[in-house]
Amino acid sequence: MDVLSRGGIYVPQHDLWLDPHHTRPVAFVTHAHADHMKKHGHVYASPPTAAMMRARGALKTRFHTLAWGEPVAWNGAQVSLYPAGHVLGSSQILVEGRDGERLLYSGDFKLRESRSSETIEVPQADVVVMETTFGRPRYEFPELDNVMEQIRSWCRDVIAQKRTPVLFCYSLGKGQEVLAGLHGCEFPVAVHAAHAKICAVYADHGVSF
């Protein structure tokens, strides 16, 4: 199975676009971050991703939602989605060709368990195309629990000075991780309207903060 990187991932044998960078008549989209979503004609995605794309302006796109592991026939292939663990609804895309060869495109993924998204599930595949934003060995990140404790401690220190702590983070993904980490704290938390819009989608899919 040939795989081309031409402004997204393209599988020519099945005329299949995965996360294309430009508008296409039909595309499979892994998640609703701006570098992965465009206003395509038709989009196959998980239900949370479809809802978040609508919330972020893809109002004219026709969405076809797939449950995890649910195959859809596409030009001689079977295509299905599996949790990627990156943000709520983020998907890996499994393409099974006519000859049984299995291609897995990871999109953005996260191996550790998340406070606000599904746990990654990796199906068997013959070929894996991975997105590795921080794949180089020089990137080493601290434990999330330690980071969240530092954030909570800083917020308390700022409040003790009779000031208001302000945290800057992405409205999709990082914001929800921070909200989950602040859950149960003794101080109230308010969010920007952009965060509130995405949190409403999370709540619709069973994740509340």
Image (cartoon, rainbow, N blue to C red):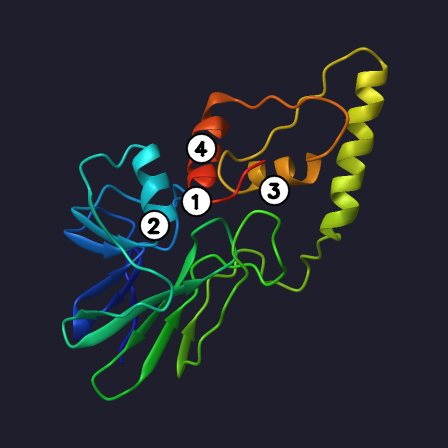
**Mark found first going from the N terminus, 1 or 4:** 4
Q: Are marks 1 and 4 in contact (CB under 8 Å)?
A: no
Residue 152 makes an appearance in the image:
yes
Q: Position of residue 186 (x, y in %)?
A: 77, 26
**Residue type highlighted by circle 3:** Glu
For disc 3, the marked residue is 177
Q: Quadrant of the N terminus?
A: bottom left
Structural distance between the alpha carbons of marks 1 and 4? 9 Å
Q: CA distance from mark 1 to mark 2?
A: 9 Å
Lower position in the chain sequence, tag 4 or tag 3: 3
Pointer 3 and pointer 2: residues touching (CB < 8 Å)?
no
Q: Dot 4, how many residues are within 10 Å of its Cα: few (below 14), some (14-19), or many (20+)?
A: some
State the CA–CA distance, disc 3 to disc 1.
16 Å
- For label 1, the crowd category at 10 Å Cα-Cα, with few meaning under 14, some 14 to 19 and many 20 or more, is some
Q: Is residue 36 visible?
A: no
Judging by the rendered image, the residue that carries numbered circle 1 is 205
Indicate the position of residue 68 as horizontal and vertical percent values.
38, 64
Three-letter residue code for mark 2: Pro
Q: Residue tagged by mark 2?
A: 47
Q: CA distance from mark 4 to mark 3?
A: 15 Å
Element type at mark 1: loop
- Residue at the spot of label 4: 200
**Closer to viewer: mark 4 or mark 3:** 4
Residue contact between numbered discs 4 and 3, judged by CB atoms under 8 Å: no
